[in-house]
Image (cartoon, rainbow, N blue to C red):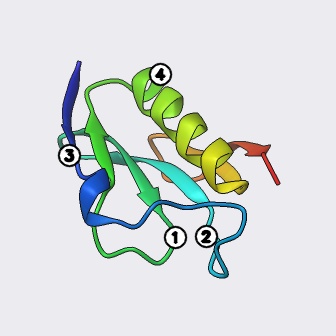
Amino acid sequence: MQICTLTAALPALSASSPLRHDVHVVPTQRGWAVSVEGASFYQSLSTTQAEAIGLGITQAREGSVSLIVHGTDGRFNKVWNYR
């Protein structure tokens, strides 16, 4: 179940965008967040890592960037490249 999505607050990433930042899936105290590098807020917050990964894959594909998935310890677990 998705808790919230804040995509309207962040400009859409696209291959033609001059600033392309990788997408991260990170653990939070309230679940799993999808975050864009350099942003001061989360794009979305999910209750499960799997759901956050699904949302992150969509964002990374749309932006032609990498998706970096962090584990509960904050370390990188997986990286998918959509460049």
Under mark 4, the amino acid is: Ala
Under mark 1, the amino acid is: Glu
Quadrant for the N terminus in the image: top left
Nearer to the camera, 17 or 34: 17
Which of the marked residues, 3 or 1, is nearer the chain's N terminus? 3
Q: Nearer the viewer, mark 3 or mark 1?
A: 1
* Callout 4 secondary element: helix
Residue hosting label 4: 50
Which of the marked residues, 3 or 4, is nearer the chain's N terminus? 3
Under mark 2, the amino acid is: His
Q: Are marks 1 and 2 in contact (CB under 8 Å)?
A: yes
Q: CA distance from mark 4 to mark 1?
A: 20 Å
Residue hosting label 2: 21
Number of residues whose C-alpha sits closer than 10 Å to that of mark 2, classed few (under 14), some (14–19) or many (20 or more): some
- In which image quadrant can residue 3 be found? top left
Number of residues whose C-alpha sits closer than 10 Å to that of mark 4, classed few (under 14), some (14–19) or many (20 or more): few
Which of the marked residues, 2 or 4, is nearer the chain's N terminus? 2
Residue hosting label 3: 29
At which x and y percent is residue 16?
71, 69
Residue hosting label 1: 37
* Callout 3 secondary element: loop
Number of residues whose C-alpha sits closer than 10 Å to that of mark 3, classed few (under 14), some (14–19) or many (20 or more): few
* Callout 1 secondary element: loop
